Image (cartoon, rainbow, N blue to C red):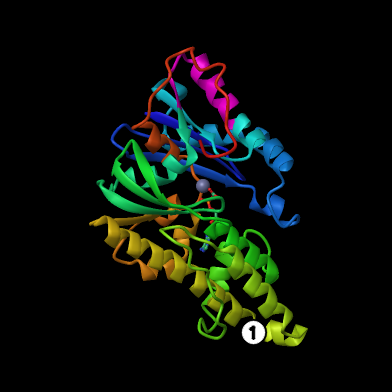
Amino acid sequence: MILGLETSCDETAAALVTADGEVRANVVASQAELHARYGGVVPEVASRRHLELVAPVVERALADAGAGLADVDAVAVTRGPGLIGALLVGLSAAKTLAWSRRLPLVPVDHLHGHVASLFLEPGSVEPPFLCLLATGGHTLLLDVQDRAGYRVVGTTLDDAAGEAFDKGARLLGLGYPGGAAIDRLARAGDPEAFSLPVARVPGFDFSFSGLKTALVYAVRALEAGELERRRADLAASYQRAIVRALVGRTRAAAEALGAQKVAVVGGVASNSELRESLADAELAPLALCTDNAAMIASAARFATAIPFPDYLALDAYASAA
Ligand code: KG4
Ligand code: ZN
């Protein structure tokens, strides 16, 4: 059994996954409420909260699995990218747990973790496939030929799709985190009410910063009362623009690369309109879209383990390797 830990942003998560990809426990303690009053994640606050939560979350995962540390064969942990102070809490906890039981440690890249959310049972997805990875920090099109890695085919030139959702939510006064709030409000709105253009950039890349500016102007053009009445229309139109851009680029890349299969992972993969628009694709299960540790333990099954005690000096990294 692999014990996975994830602390790259504002979720403190621990999971137990078997070598076959069966999830025995998947515990996620979200700090979203703690950061909501600041309108976004405050790194120092996140680190301190991870420190408080990491041990109880691991204990809870073990209890859920009906297991003890003696049943753990390896410890997997997110090494980056993410908030460095937050990552270091998970990495230190993982080193401590592994070292105390003379276990190997498997450092995992967070983005590889998102892709590996597709390799869990039931319904593990077999490569090759083209993968749209859309989170708060990244928007990538990945050519996945095997379970151990991928080749980047496209990326965002500015904001990530999740970041666009979060910034849009903020402009609409929906608070943090914004993606799910826009998703909910959009259901009551008309997606064709406002024309919000998304820049088309060459190749298979994305650009979302212009869309955010378009929303700023659309919001400014409305009086307070009018804005209140049109909020759902704005949310629906904004979501439609992001989803169209994601779906358009993904389908174009799939066709150009001759991909037989398309998969979608990451926090934005929970978006209901995106899921409906790519209903023929392999969609990561809802519980595994936003940050969790089951996907990290899953990725560890296909990554290189560092034997005891060679990992003690291992460092985290903040930006994509
Ligand atoms: O993968 P994730 O949990 O963390 C990162 O690695 O960044 O993704 C978080 C992002 C946030 O930007 C959040 O607003 C977005 O995923 N998100 C959504 C939805 N649920 C979460 N975006 C659109 N619709 C949703 N339902
Ligand atoms: Zn993530």
Q: Is residue 104 above or below residue 292?
A: above
Q: Quadrant of residue 193?
A: bottom right
The question of residue 45 being in magenta is answered with no
For the question of whether residue 272 can be seen, the reply is no
Q: Is residue 251 above or below residue 20?
A: below
Q: Residue 87, how many percent across, how many down? A: 60, 34
Q: Quadrant of the N terminus?
A: top left
In the image: residue 227, left or right of residue 110: right
Residue labelled with disc 1: 230
Q: Residue 12, how many percent across, how many down? A: 58, 40
Q: Give the residue drawn at x 48%, y 13%.
A: 310
- Taking depth in this image into account, of 109 and 45 the one nearest to the observer is 109
Please rate how many residues cluster around mark 1, counting C-alpha atoms within 10 Å: few if below 14, some from 14 to 19, many from 20: some
The question of residue 101 being in magenta is answered with yes
- Taking depth in this image into account, of 243 and 187 the one nearest to the observer is 243
Q: Give the residue drawn at x 37%, y 30%.
A: 303
Q: Please state the total of marks drawn on the protein image.
A: 1
Q: Which residues are magenta?
A: 90-106
